[in-house]
Amino acid sequence: MESASNEEMLPPALPLATLIGRELRGGGSERPLVRYGHSGFAKRGEDYFLVKPDCLRVPGDPSSAFSVFAVFDGHNGVSAAVFSKEHLLDDVMSAVPQGISREDWLQVLPRALVAGFVKTDIDFQRKGEMSGTTATLVVIVSELIDGFTVTVASVGDSRCILDTQGGVVSLLTVDHRLEENAEERERVTASGGEVSRLNLCGGQQVGPLRCWPGGLCLSRSIGDTDVGEFIVPIPHVKQVKLSSAGGRLIIASDGIWDAVSSEIAAQACRGLPAELAAKLVVKQALKTTGLKDDTTCVVVDIIPSDHCSTPPPSSPKQNQNKLRSLLFGRRSHSSVGKLGNKKKSASFGFVEELFEEGSALLEERLGRNCLSKANLPPFRCAICQVDQVPFEDLVTDSGEGYCSAPSTPSTAPYLCSGCRKKKDAMEGKRSSRSTACT
């Protein structure tokens, strides 16, 4: 990156987000900003991304705002990636009860993400198309006063990293690659799949580990109707709380991560606005390995309201000049990587983990982060959100069935017959290919 190597890093005293926020707002706004940029190059044209910075939990209520960003890396065609881009967010939101508080909304979001991913997978497989896709979905909610909550759900290997003040880079996703994930290899084989490399004539094995039938390198995805049910759409979910210092998210397909590490990607674009940062990450990946795969990168800067004393407002021209100086002025090489201990990290860019779960067992995932049933219709399927006729074909996620009204209500979520068959198939108990979501 010759054009970037002549630029120096910003001083470590304040996060980039705070500096930009000061200059752009001139001290006038209490609401945080989310700025984003995206870039990419197509090899097969199977990467897609989603940008929705101005969502509302409650229509017409600005205080209920949240932002959503996602990357979908398709394989064997684009249909699964396109379908997920169009339907995944709606499927997630349909699993969140209406009329609940911000705190409760955040509490049930991990469970809703699981339900939404599975519903999108079921609905796509009903189309009978063979393609599949990774999916990394990021939801950002401002706490307005004391920080931000970031929730990330992912299947596959489209990674999301968080870069905070002091150069602390955190991985918010787990790669579901059979080559690198021993737990997923064990799960696939226990569910009836076979894990091995591609066999050539003479018995020579080449390439990464794959699951058979299908030959997919991933253990989790949306779609892939022609592959065994042990390739599941149940996402790894992580929820963290950022301090008021904000931070930067980099969401990208494996065309980026196969070329550069998380640390290199973060370092390559520090001190640059989001749009330019995304282009620089893609350029760094292409410089390293060339265009071997689709490369897609979305950079999101979470810019806090300024809680420190703010300089008097400047004219627009003065603001533009100051911002250019901040972004493209000289940076001190001596400041790189020195802010690494926990005390300094906690002071300038503290990140608190609120929730993390990666189990592929649907029963475990749907039974957690669930509000009282008073917030939900009594016999609504936890995945497809279809209301059931009371005591007719009702089965809880634990497998308990009812022929008449139960004397003691079950605490497990209800599943309709189609979604229950999907659950059993993912656990290796039966196939749901011809009966999914009937």
Image (tube, rainbow, N blue to C red):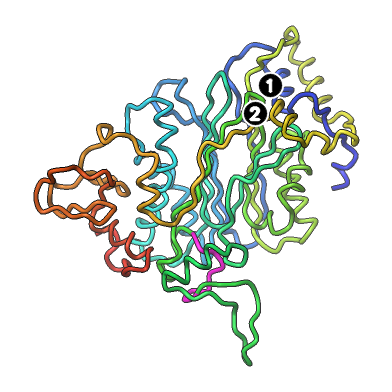
- Compared across the picture, whether 170 is left or right of 374 comes to right
Residue 244: name its quadrant: top right
In the image, residue 418 above or below residue 196: above
Q: Kindly identify the residue that appears in the image at 73 percent across and 43 percent down.
A: 266
Give the x, y percent position of residue 430.
Answer: 31, 69
Q: Which mark is residue 21?
A: 1
Please, what is the dominant secondary structure of the magenta stretch? loop
Q: Kindly identify the residue that appears in the image at 84 percent across and 37 percent down.
A: 336
Amino acid under label 2?
Answer: Gly
- Compared across the picture, whether 400 is left or right of 61 comes to left
Q: Which residues are magenta?
A: 212-220
Number of marks:
2
Q: Earlier in the sequence, mark 1 or mark 2?
A: 1
In the image shown, does 190 or 278 lie closer to the viewer?
A: 190
Q: Secondary structure at mark 2?
A: loop
In the image shown, does 57 or 173 lie closer to the viewer?
A: 173
| Residue farthest along the top direction in this orientation | 312
- Compared across the picture, whether 64 is left or right of 156 comes to left
Tell me whether circle 1 and circle 2 mark residues in contact (CB < 8 Å).
Answer: yes
The residue to which callout 2 is attached is: 246
The C terminus lies in quadrant: bottom left
Q: Which mark is residue 67?
A: none
Residue 97: name its quadrant: top left
In the image, residue 37 above or below residue 246: below
